[in-house]
Image: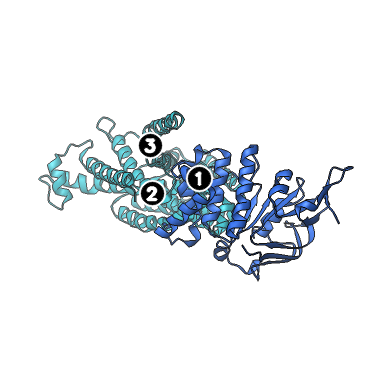
């Protein structure tokens, strides 16, 4: 690995550590830094409330943000490469719409059919929502993979994916129209995205799943590098393009499905982080971009989560708004600066 | 360099197969392509030059007939094996950003690299050699998006050389280039075939240039006809303006 790349990775790693600690430290209740440090290393805080806030609320939330940011960014990078489209992102194939559709069915229909508003069911309801999201997202993903085997062009597939997204959104609209107001509200809140919703036991499941899936996506770096050259060249260099496309879509789709199921549809991160990494590291090599996106995605998600929880906002800001509000200018600046450098040379 | 038979086509018919029909472009091609020679494929637009190249590269199955590559049927080769025998330079424009010339040429080593695609010292040496053979060692560190069309074409040729394949197919390598670059690229390809014994087969619209550098010319004309011969025997029909080989 070249020196500047290694330096960049180390900086990103340090940023993650700092942001993670800040996530534990800052919030509506102020806890002294020393106490946070102590709890983090397995000690007992002087105050049980502090201990609970850190271990039961902030720690799981930070961990969720970290894993979700990493997963979405890696998925976004894979999508952008496989579709050779800078605007592709995790949501582009309708996978997150599929998750939304699943949740909409459960949240909006249960009240109507079962007579119980799911939003009042607490833990069971939460679990049902997660499962519904996973099922919805994976169903759409299987549909896309099936279509990917039938159609040849990337653009066709992309458009079909976007269309599926529209159909899902339309069905959700119909469901909303016929639902009770409180159920609609529960659905809208889910749709805003949050790293805080995932509770204790589910965090472990989520983080373990991501820890298993993310290394798997690293197995595709050579494939992704070859896909950059275009189908013809990739094929001539010994790549089975069709199989490659399907494995990349499956990998990215599963990542998005899991993250969306646990955190709701988090927009923007997956689209922006790969661009950010290309801008910083000035390379197209996925051996660099993949770990870079993973680290930068985790760092950016932690930063967004921190801002969403800043004292004063008191958790009032939905993560989805923060990701776009913070992310969009950052990406624009990076791209703009690079453009100036390119033309200036 | 020795002149040896690399590719033999017997009764080859090329075309596209769709779900409902077969659109045949050219039939009854029985020809041989030799190593150490530059073979140019010329013909009007729509005569099927690209189809023939795509079929020979294994991208498209033949409608009928047989393609024998180095003594074995083309279809018996696996993707991996084929990638070490045929290298291609295509017309499709790659929209590559943030990749250096050296990295792009290094991609030509993919069939030989391991799981992560890391280049060994040997691979790097081969990349250096390829750059030198094409005469673009000076471009090594440049980003691909800053290159001119001619330079980019040379980089793709260097990529094909790094692939170390005995056969190189090029689809219109001189399109979009200015005249001096056209001459340069074709001369370069002629030299590569003669000095290194490569089998080079390319399609082009630049007839006069092709006639000057080619060892052998394949002429495809509209009604699905293919004629071959040496460039000296090609004559123009004064009435139609079409080319023909002297009998």
Chain letter for mark 1, please.
B
CA gap, disc 3 to disc 1?
A: 44 Å
Q: Which residue is mark 3?
A: A323
**Residue nearest the viewer, comparing A266 with A84:** A84
Dot 2: element: helix
Dot 1: element: loop
Chain displayed in blue? B
Chain letter for mark 2, please.
A
CA gap, disc 3 to disc 2?
A: 24 Å
Left/right of residue B19 with respect to residue B187 in the rendered view: right
Callouts 3 and 1 on one subunit: no
Q: Of marks 3 and 2, which one's residue comes earlier in the chain?
A: 2
Q: Which residue is mark 1?
A: B136
Which residue is drawn at the image coordinates 75% and 54% (left, top)?
A: B218
Dot 3: element: helix
Q: Which residue is mark 2?
A: A288
Give residue A330's position: percent from left, percent from top: 37, 33
Q: Colour of chain A?
A: cyan
Which residue is drawn at the image coordinates 12% and 42% (left, top)?
A: A34
How many neighbours does mark 3 have within 10 angstroms: few (below 14), some (14-19), or many (20 or more)? many
């Amino acid at each position: 690995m070249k020196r500047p790349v290694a330096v960049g990775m180390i900086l990103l790693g340090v940023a993650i550590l700092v942001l993670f600690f800040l996530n534990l430290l800052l919030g509506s209740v102020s806890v002294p830094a020393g106490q946070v440090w102590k709890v983090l290393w397995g000690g007992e805080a002087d105050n049980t409330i502090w201990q609970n806030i850190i271990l039961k609320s902030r720690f799981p939330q930070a961990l969720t943000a970290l894993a979700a940011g990493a997963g979405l960014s890696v998925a976004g990078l894979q999508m952008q490469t496989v579709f050779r489209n800078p605007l592709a992102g995790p949501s582009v194939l309708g996978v997150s719409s599929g998750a939304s559709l699943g949740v909409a069915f459960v949240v909006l229909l249960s009240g109507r059919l079962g007579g119980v508003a799911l939003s009042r069911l607490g833990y069971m309801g939460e679990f049902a929502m997660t499962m519904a999201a996973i099922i919805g997202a994976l169903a759409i993903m299987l549909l896309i993979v099936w279509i990917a085997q039938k159609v040849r062009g990337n653009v066709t597939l992309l458009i079909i994916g976007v269309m599926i997204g529209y159909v899902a959104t339309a069905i959700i609209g119909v469901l909303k129209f016929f639902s009770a107001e409180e159920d609609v509200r529960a659905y809208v809140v889910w749709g805003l995205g949050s790293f805080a919703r995932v509770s204790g036991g589910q965090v472990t499941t989520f983080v373990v799943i991501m820890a298993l899936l993310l290394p798997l996506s690293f197995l595709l770096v050579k494939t992704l590098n070859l896909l950059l050259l275009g189908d013809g060249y990739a094929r001539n260099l010994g790549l089975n393009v069709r199989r490659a496309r399907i494995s990349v879509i499956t990998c990215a789709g599963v990542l998005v499905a899991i993250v969306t199921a646990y955190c709701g549809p988090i927009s923007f991160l997956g689209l922006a982080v790969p661009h950010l990494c290309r801008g910083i590291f000035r390379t197209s090599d996925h051996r660099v971009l993949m770990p870079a996106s993973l680290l930068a995605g985790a760092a950016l998600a932690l930063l967004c989560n921190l801002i969403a929880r800043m004292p004063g906002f008191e958790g009032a800001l939905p993560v989805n708004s923060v990701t776009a509000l913070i992310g969009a200018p950052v990406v624009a600046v990076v791209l703009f600066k690079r453009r100036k450098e390119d033309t200036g040379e | 360099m020795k002149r040896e038979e690399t590719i033999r086509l017997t009764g080859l018919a090329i075309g596209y197969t769709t779900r409902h029909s077969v659109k045949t472009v050219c039939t009854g091609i029985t020809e041989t392509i030799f190593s150490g020679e530059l073979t140019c494929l010329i013909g009007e637009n729509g005569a099927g030059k690209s189809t023939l190249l795509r079929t020979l590269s294994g991208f498209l199955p033949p409608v009928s007939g047989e393609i024998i590559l180095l003594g074995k049927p083309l279809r018996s080769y696996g993707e991996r094996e084929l990638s070490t025998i045929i290298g291609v330079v295509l017309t499709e424009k790659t929209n590559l950003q943030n990749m250096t010339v050296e990295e792009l040429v290094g991609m030509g080593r993919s069939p030989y690299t391991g799981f992560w695609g890391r280049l060994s010292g040997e691979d790097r040496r081969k990349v250096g050699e390829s750059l030198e053979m094409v005469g673009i060692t000076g471009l090594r560190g440049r980003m691909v998006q800053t290159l001119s069309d001619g330079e980019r074409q040379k980089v793709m040729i260097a990529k094909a050389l790094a692939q170390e394949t005995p056969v190189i197919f090029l689809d219109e390598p001189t399109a979009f280039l200015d005249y001096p670059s056209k001459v340069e690229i074709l001369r370069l390809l002629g030299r590569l075939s003669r000095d290194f014994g490569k089998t080079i087969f390319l399609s082009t619209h630049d007839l006069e240039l092709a006639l000057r550098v080619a060892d052998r010319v394949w002429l495809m004309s509209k009604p699905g006809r293919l004629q071959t011969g040496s460039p000296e025997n090609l004559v123009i029909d004064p009435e139609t303006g079409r080319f023909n080989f002297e009998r």
